[in-house]
Amino acid sequence: MRQSKVHIDKQITSKPNNQEPDSVENKFSPPQKKSIEDRKLNFQNNMVDCLRNEKSIYLNEKEENRRFFEYWTEHGEFDKKMRFEKETSFSISRRLETWFMKANKFKPLVQKSRVQETVENMQSAYEKVKQKIAEEEIN
């Protein structure tokens, strides 16, 4: 019985065009697991591809993309899986869409500089003074 199994394995692993067959040991050895760093790189490439393929307006938001990447590739020192690998279902495009939708809720699309805020405050104060002077002239 052992001989027939080896014979079948050799048939399965043999290559076309009279090339040398693979060794029988390769057939039964477990596949090499990728390291966490390799899987992180793969996630990053998939993320960038997703942003490019959908012509996403978020492609240039480097800081927010970095936060997304760091959040979903987070893992403990002795963990074998990253956060996204622990999810039962995970779609990068859907997660990105949700991430940016929620991020935009919590920060304005255009952040004002201190100079802009100062100018607006001065204009507001000027308008209030102008309105008060106009009211006093009427009375």
Image (tube, rainbow, N blue to C red):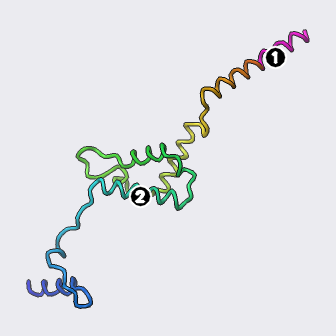
Q: Quadrant of residue 118?
A: top right
Q: Which residue is mark 2?
A: 45
In space, the residues marked 2 and 1 are separated at their CA atoms by 58 Å
Find residue 84 and report its horizontal and vertical position in percent: 37, 52
The structure residue drawn at horizontal position 40% and vertical position 54%, both measured from the top left corner, is: 44
- Secondary structure, mark 1, is helix
Q: Residue furthest right?
A: 138
Q: Residue furthest bottom?
A: 18
Q: Nearer the viewer, residue 99 or 87?
A: 99
Q: Nearer the viewer, residue 104 or 116?
A: 116
Q: Tell whether 135 sits left or right of 41.
A: right
Q: Tell whether 90 sits left or right of 115.
A: left
Q: Is residue 98 magenta?
A: no
Mark 2 vs 1, N-terminal side: 2
**Circle 2/circle 1 CB separation < 8 Å:** no
The structure residue drawn at horizontal position 27% and vertical position 60%, both measured from the top left corner, is: 34
Q: Quadrant of the C terminus?
A: top right
**Label 1 amino acid?**
Lys
Find residue 35 and report its horizontal and vertical position in percent: 26, 56
The structure residue drawn at horizontal position 52% and vertical position 46%, both measured from the top left corner, is: 61
Q: Is residue 128 magenta?
A: yes
Q: Nearer the viewer, residue 45 or 72?
A: 45
Q: Quadrant of the N terminus?
A: bottom left
Q: Tell whether 82 sits left or right of 61.
A: left
Q: Which mark is residue 130?
A: 1
Q: Quadrant of residue 134?
A: top right
**Label 2 amino acid?**
Asn
Q: Tell whether 1 sits left or right of 35.
A: left
Q: Bounds of the magenta span?
A: 127-139
Find residue 88 and report its horizontal and vertical position in percent: 37, 56
